[in-house]
Image (cartoon, grey):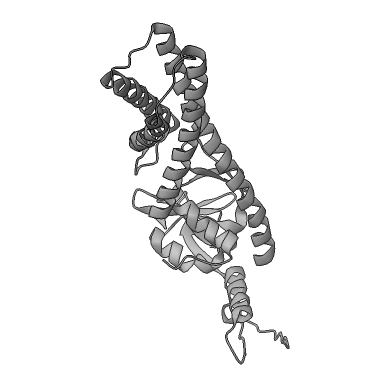
């Protein structure tokens, strides 16, 4: 049950991430490289970045109950690792950007990072609302 | 089903006897209800007095420094049990583990809300807020939403 839960969380984060990266690549491409045409291999880039981004989330995992400060610190490290991974992979494949593109990309990655957590939090919020509804029924039934 | 109430002089000899053809879920529910209503625990208060208190009035049990404490609306009692024993013994009385160190009373749980760290907060009816671990959130959901306990 526990492993299933982890896999389910991983997959949710992966799909949300991949969707956001696809949209981001589309928008940034249209703005900064409108004349460029990409090969079919480019379709693998969003899921690849999505997979590695979620995989780097290991830094946020802990068996101990973390405080809010510790969580925020670990999430900041997670974001830095993702930024490093994206720019590192681009550098290794001979893609270097002008400063304005670099900053836009860095900010966009941070935006996606926050968006993924907000979407997952909203998902938890929905799950909590459903639990609360059933809790009232449970309490009435068992009282 | 017939109900018979007979008055007796001594409180210690109070008992409920269920006579049935088959021990079905209704009978089990009646048994659990009686157990939860009548159940009392002994605990040591903060000013070192031994007192008895009702299990249904306990909001949660917490393990701290090898000791287990029971929290009621206005008192904290140290009890002579391990947390896993509390979890097992009072599972039928609507108590469920919500983290490594806490077993809470589902009947006195107001609601839950998501926390920043992917876990959940349990808001108790006395205004206290407890943390629900991911691992135990799933089991709590099974009890409340599935109508049964996880036997894993």
Say which quarter of the image contains residue A96: top left
Q: Which of A134 and A44 is in front in this view?
A: A44
User: For this rendering, which residue is in front, A129 or B105?
Assistant: A129
Q: How many marks?
A: 0
- Residue drawn at (49%, 54%) of the image: B138
Residue at the spot 51% in from the left edge and 66% down from the top edge: B149
Q: Where is residue B103 in the image (x, y as percent from the top left)?
A: 47, 55
Give the side of residue A27 with respect to residue A102, left or right.
right
The image position of residue B1, as x and y in percent, is 72, 87
Instruction: Say whether residue A41 is visible.
Output: yes
Outermost bottom residue: B21
Direction top: furthest residue: A99
Q: Residue at x 34, y 44 (%)?
A: A63
Residue B114: image quadrant is top right
From the viewer's side, name the closer residue of A53 and B148.
A53
Drawn side of residue A55 relative to residue B47, left or right: left
Residue positioned 62% across, 72% down in the render: B33
Q: Is residue B65 above or below residue A107?
A: below
Where is B56 relative to B4, above or below?
above
Q: Which of B147 and B85 is in front in this view?
A: B147
Please indicate, yes or no, whether residue B80 appears anywhere in the rendered image. no
Where does the image place residue B28, in percent across and percent down from the top left?
58, 78
Q: In which quarter of the image is the N terminus of chain A?
A: bottom left
- Which image quarter holds the C terminus of chain A? bottom right
In the rendering, at what x and y percent does residue B118 appear? 47, 40
Position above or below: B6 against A139: below
């Amino acid at each position: 049950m526990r492993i299933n839960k982890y896999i389910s969380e991983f997959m949710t984060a992966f799909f949300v991430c991949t969707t956001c990266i696809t949209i981001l690549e589309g928008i940034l491409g249209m703005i900064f490289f409108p004349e460029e045409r990409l090969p079919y291999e480019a379709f693998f880039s969003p899921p690849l970045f999505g997979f590695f981004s979620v995989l780097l989330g290991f830094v946020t995992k802990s068996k101990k109950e973390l405080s809010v400060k510790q969580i925020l610190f670990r999430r900041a490290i997670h974001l830095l690792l993702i930024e490093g991974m994206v720019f590192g992979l681009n550098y290794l494949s001979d893609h270097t950007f002008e400063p304005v593109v670099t900053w836009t990309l860095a900010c966009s990655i941070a935006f996606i990072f926050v968006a993924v957590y907000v979407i997952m939090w909203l998902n938890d919020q929905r799950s909590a609302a459903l639990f609360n509804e059933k809790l009232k029924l449970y309490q009435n039934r068992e009282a | 089903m017939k109900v018979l109430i007979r008055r007796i002089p001594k409180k210690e000899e109070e008992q409920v006897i269920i006579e049935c053809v088959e021990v079905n879920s209704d009978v089990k529910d009646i048994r659990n209800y009686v157990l939860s209503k009548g159940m009392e625990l002994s605990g040591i208060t903060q000013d070192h007095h031994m007192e008895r208190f009702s299990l249904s009035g306990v909001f949660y049990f917490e393990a701290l420094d090898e000791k287990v404490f029971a929290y009621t609306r206005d008192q904290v009692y140290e009890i002579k049990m391990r947390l896993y024993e509390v979890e097992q013994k009072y599972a039928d009385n609507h108590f469920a583990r919500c983290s490594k160190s806490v077993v809470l009373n589902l009947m006195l749980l107001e609601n839950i809300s998501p926390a920043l760290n992917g876990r959940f907060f349990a808001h108790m009816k006395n205004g206290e807020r407890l943390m629900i671990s991911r691992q135990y959130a799933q089991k709590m959901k099974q009890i409340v939403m599935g109508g049964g306990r996880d036997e894993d």
